[in-house]
Image: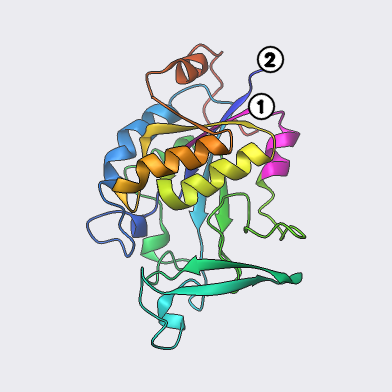
Amino acid sequence: MSFTPVLLIIDFQEDFLPPSGAVAVPSGRTIAPTINALLALPFATAIASQDWHPPDHVSFAANHAPPNNVPFASTTRLVNPRNPAEAVETRLWPVHCVQGSAGARFAPELDAARIQHVVRKGGDRDVECYSAFGPPFRDPPATGTGLAETLRAAGVTHVFVAGLAADYCVRCSAVDAAREGFVTVVVREGTKAVVPEDMEKVERELAAEGVRMVGFDGEEVERVRRLKVVPAGEPI
């Protein structure tokens, strides 16, 4: 089987990081060394996603009327703009990753010079978008980010996922990568969850979609190490 792997780093942004991020993932900064070590490996390319919300985004609890406006607790129903019969329930969050804000910036620890492509998501005020591939609607599919098409055009076969958070955007991105036909793994040391005690559940959910959690020192990452080195900064 051919092997053209890509590294997909999900939302390693200030608003998801302690101590002051609006939606700080516990121990989120501790994954930086693993992510940078992955970036140093000869992946075909490295892509980072970036939450990029307008101030009036539907996921912000502050944009909803009481009593349904409690961050982390309240939810709202989102409807497929192209099919009113399809809807999903989504959690409401504090205001985070507003376009152009300090909280939307990548973490300074990230070796951003090695990232060759950035995918921005969540720019539609009326649609939640955890996945780097696009919104969750399937019937018909909502307009995506173009990531799947970019990967297919480049001949990518395998997607290695890291970043934040394991139980939301990492999980959704990995599942979508697998559904798009890519062999997909999540690097365990390169992710953390909003709810750490849910990690076993997340791993089961990923496995049900054909996605495996793998170790940084495991055979999957070792296979990348053995590849011919690609010049830093060379695009897809």
Picture coordinates of residue 198 (x, y %)? 35, 47
| Position of residue 177 in the picture relative to residue 215 (left or right) | right
Disc 1 target residue: 157
Q: Quadrant of the N terminus?
A: top right
- Decide whether residue 202 is among the magenta residues: no
Mark 1 lies on a secondary structure that is loop
Dot 1, crowdedness within 10 Å: few (<14), some or many (≥20)? Answer: some
Does residue 204 appear in this view?
yes
| Position of residue 81 in the picture relative to residue 101 (left or right) | right
Dividing the picture into quarters, in which one does residue 213 lie?
top left
Does residue 8 appear in this view?
no
Dot 2, crowdedness within 10 Å: few (<14), some or many (≥20)? Answer: few
Which of the numbered marks, if any, corresponds to residue 180?
Answer: none
- Work out how far the residue at label 1 is from the one at label 2, CA to CA, in angstroms: 9 Å
**Residue at x 66%, y 27% (from the top left corner):** 157
| Position of residue 185 in the picture relative to residue 97 (left or right) | right
Q: Quadrant of the C terminus?
A: top right
Picture coordinates of residue 123 (x, y %)? 58, 66
Q: Amino acid at mark 2?
A: Met
Q: Amino acid at mark 1?
A: Thr
Q: State yes or no: discs 1 and 2 in contact (Cβ < 8 Å).
A: yes
| Position of residue 57 in the picture relative to residue 104 (left or right) | right
Magenta segment boundaries in residue numbering: 148-162
Disc 2 target residue: 1
